[in-house]
Amino acid sequence: MDQKDIDYFKDLLTQRLEDLLAQAEDTVSDMHDSKGNFPDPTDRAAYEAERNFELRIRDREHKLIKKVKKALERIEDGTFGICERCGEDIDTKRLKVRPVTTLCIECKTKEEAQEKALGL
């Protein structure tokens, strides 16, 4: 991978990380500002369901934040874009779609087939 591609992915991942962190901060602020006192049980249930949904989304984003940070670390140590299983280069097209990936398409396909066979 040439330096132009590395710079592109570094900028992309840095921007994504900033966006995710800003969203997480907004969620925390909203949760502290929210009033959870509803006299109607139906309103309370709807509020709780919405809050639980928001927390699940934030949990997924938290996991994505970790993956983005690890991808940025791989850029710094020179291992970004190299499959951690077979050691081959990961196609740039795949990285553009999923820049946090650590597996080439062949290894990921094999992994998914094994998971499916094991019922995971």
Image: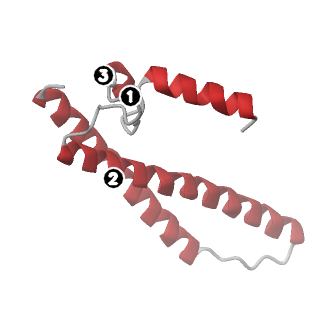
Determine the residue positioned at 47% across, 20% down.
Answer: 106
Instruction: Report the side of 6 relative to 102 (left or right).
Output: left
**Spatial distance from mark 1 to mark 2, Cα to Cα?**
22 Å
Query: If you read the primary sequence from the N terminus, does the residue marked by circle 3 or circle 2 appear first?
Result: 2
> Any mark on residue 92, and which?
3
The residue depicted at 51 percent of the width and 28 percent of the height is 108
Tell me which residue sits at (65%, 77%) in the image. Answer: 35
Nearer the observer, disc 1 or disc 3?
1
Res 104 visible: yes
Q: Secondary structure at mark 2?
A: helix
> How dense is the environment of label 1, judged by Cα within 10 Å: few (below 14), some, or many (20 and up)?
few
Using a 10 Å C-alpha cutoff, classify the residue at mark 2 as few (fewer than 14 neighbours), some (14 to 19) or many (20 or more).
some
Q: Mark 3 is on which residue type?
A: Thr
Answer with mark 1 or mark 2, whichever residue precedes in sequence.
2
The quadrant in which the C terminus is found is top right
At mark 1, the secondary structure is loop
Q: Quadrant of the N terminus?
A: top left
Instruction: Indicate whether 69 appears above or below 114.
Output: below
Query: Most extreme residue toward the right, as rendered?
Result: 41
Question: Percent x, y for residue 46?
Answer: 79, 61
Q: Position of residue 16 (x, y in %)?
A: 34, 45
